[in-house]
Image (spheres, helix red, strand yellow):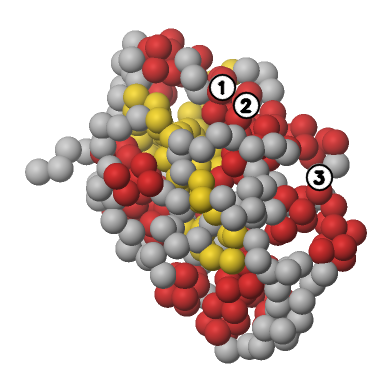
Amino acid sequence: MMSVMRIAITGFRGLIGKALAANLRTDGHEIVGISRSREPAAAPSGSSQSIEQTAVWDVAAGTIDAAALEGLDAVVHLAGESIGGRWSARKKAAIMSSRVESTKLLADTVRSLDAKPSVFVSGSAVGFYGNRGEEELTEWSLPGDGFLAEVCKQWERAAVPIPDAGVRLVRIRTGLVVGPGAEAIERMAKITRLGAGGPLGDGRQWWSWISLNDEVRAIRHLIDSDVDGAFNLTAPNPARQRDFQRALSTALRRPSFMPAPQFAIRAALGEMGQALLLDSTRVLPDALTDDGFEFADPDLETALAAAL
């Protein structure tokens, strides 16, 4: 019989956190949502109950309800400021601090617990590798340059003290999530439905993606495994942006021939547009598959059809 786990999740109101909580609760596991308030979260899709148990934290003040985290089996840290929108100096500071300071707070708290969790799953992203053109990137590749790479490096570094407390540390570098409710996919779908879909720039840049279903399955796999270190949560078949757009257009049965020039994207969206839409990051999930994980959705066309 499967043992019931008690798992804390930050960012449990977000796309991945909500899906993960629903999946875990379906199997009878107990979820502790770490939040800025005790207001219960709405019932996740597929769950008949809301997440009623919460631990309140205030990252800016450096406080957290540590008593509610005693006796956990796992912590999954997914919270962070959205990277969408123009990157003003204030926005970039919020993106950085929301990830780094929250991870430091959780790391210090976990180290102070009497009954510590056995595993800490800490979020990160494929932005760790920066703009790398045609290079195939695995977990053993060096970090890249640029704002997102620096965010990911500091984000991951903030979790480094956790193993000193005897807690297994897993860092998940997530790619573009394809699933119902994914903001980036919904925005692309809206443009495509209007007949304005097409390549961004020359469309040759690599986009590393993963279905929401496989994102959740991979996190659960890593909780249950005994491995540690960094893991790329991306499908084994990254796609060039033009092929991604073509698959999206096929799923929506709409044309895809309206290119968006690089200069127009940079003018409209600035540094964010360059980093999220035009940079090329060809990431492979070698460590994940080496640990025996099998993707349910390795095919982009199928994943997009399910998402839409």
The residue under label 1 is 158
**Image point (77%, 76%), residue name:** 259
Which quadrant of the structure image shows residue 187?
A: bottom right
**Image point (34%, 11%), residue name:** 114
User: Marks 3 and 1, how far apart in space?
Assistant: 23 Å
The residue under label 3 is 87
Q: Amino acid at mark 1?
A: Ala
Determine contact: label 3, label 2, CB under 8 Å: no
Residue 154 tag number: 2
Using the image as rendered, state which of residue 237 and residue 196 is in the foreground. Answer: 237
Q: Position of residue 192 (x, y in %)?
A: 68, 79
Q: Position of residue 5 (x, y in %)?
A: 26, 36
Q: Amino acid at mark 2?
A: Gln
Determine contact: label 2, label 1, CB under 8 Å: yes
Let me know if residue 171 appears in the view: yes
Say what secondary structure mark 2 lies in: helix
Q: Residues within 10 Å of mark 1 (few under 14, many from 20)?
A: many
Q: Amino acid at mark 3?
A: Trp
Using the image, determine if residue 197 lies above or below residue 222.
below
Check the image and name the residue furthest to the front. Answer: 134
Which quadrant of the structure image shows residue 235?
A: bottom left
Let me know if residue 306 appears in the view: no
Using the image as rendered, state which of residue 148 and residue 181 is in the foreground. Answer: 148
